[in-house]
């Protein structure tokens, strides 16, 4: 598996442990995260700090995770580097997700939203 998960309070932090989120791993990534969502996880941080490249399949997997959560929760992206941020801006995906520098900030946002 190319992800590592950990719980911080009610928030699930999913760290992608691969430099590319592309067609080779996107389906496994999406299946793994959607499985967590189906088991009740609704507040999710996707840590992309190790990711240097995302292709259209990877982008689709990210959007699918957001759609799977729906209105019941939120997906926040953390740790996106310059190249990944450029891709988000070019595809206007940065308007779909909250994107923050660190897991700690993302967790804080998701925990604060509950109050």
Image (cartoon, grey):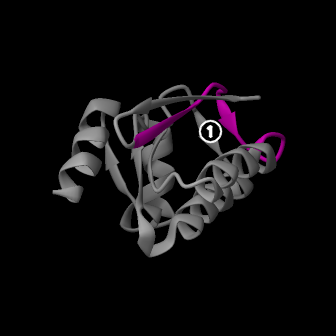
Residue extending farthest right: 24
Residue 43 relative to residue 35: left or right = left
Taking the magenta stretch, the answer to whether it contains residue 13 is yes
Q: Residues within 10 Å of mark 1 (few under 14, many from 20)?
A: some
Q: Is residue 3 magenta?
A: no
Counting the numbered discs, the total is 1
Coordinates of residue 99 in the picture (x, y in percent) = 34, 49
Image quarter of the C terminus: bottom left
Please indicate whether residue 79 sits to the left or right of residue 112 in the image. Answer: right
* Along the line of sight, the residue nearer the viewer: 40 or 84: 40
Instruction: Where is residue 7? Give x, y as percent.
Output: 45, 32
Check disc 1 and report the residue beneath it.
Answer: 53
For image coordinates 43% across by 69% down, the residue present is 72
**What is the span of residues highlighted in magenta in the rendered image?**
11-25
Give the position of the N terminus as an image quadrant: top right
**Residue 69 x, y percent position in the rendering:** 52, 65
Whole-percent x and y of residue 87?
Answer: 51, 52
**Residue furthest out toward the bottom:** 71
> Is disc 1 placed on a helix, strand or loop?
strand
With 71 as the anchor, is 60 left or right in this view? right
Q: In percent of the image, x 40 and y 60: which residue is there?
A: 74
């Amino acid at each position: 598996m190319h992800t590592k998960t950990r719980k911080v309070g009610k928030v699930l932090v999913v760290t992608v442990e691969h430099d590319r989120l592309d067609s080779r791993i996107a389906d496994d990534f999406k299946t793994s995260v959607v499985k967590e969502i189906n088991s009740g996880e609704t507040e999710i941080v996707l840590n992309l700090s190790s990711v240097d490249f995302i292709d259209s399949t990877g982008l689709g997997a990210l959007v699918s995770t957001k759609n799977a959560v729906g209105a019941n929760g939120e997906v926040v992206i953390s740790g996106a580097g310059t190249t990944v941020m450029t891709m988000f801006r070019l595809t206007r995906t940065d308007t779909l997700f909250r994107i923050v520098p660190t897991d700690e900030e993302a967790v804080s946002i998701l925990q604060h939203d509950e109050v």
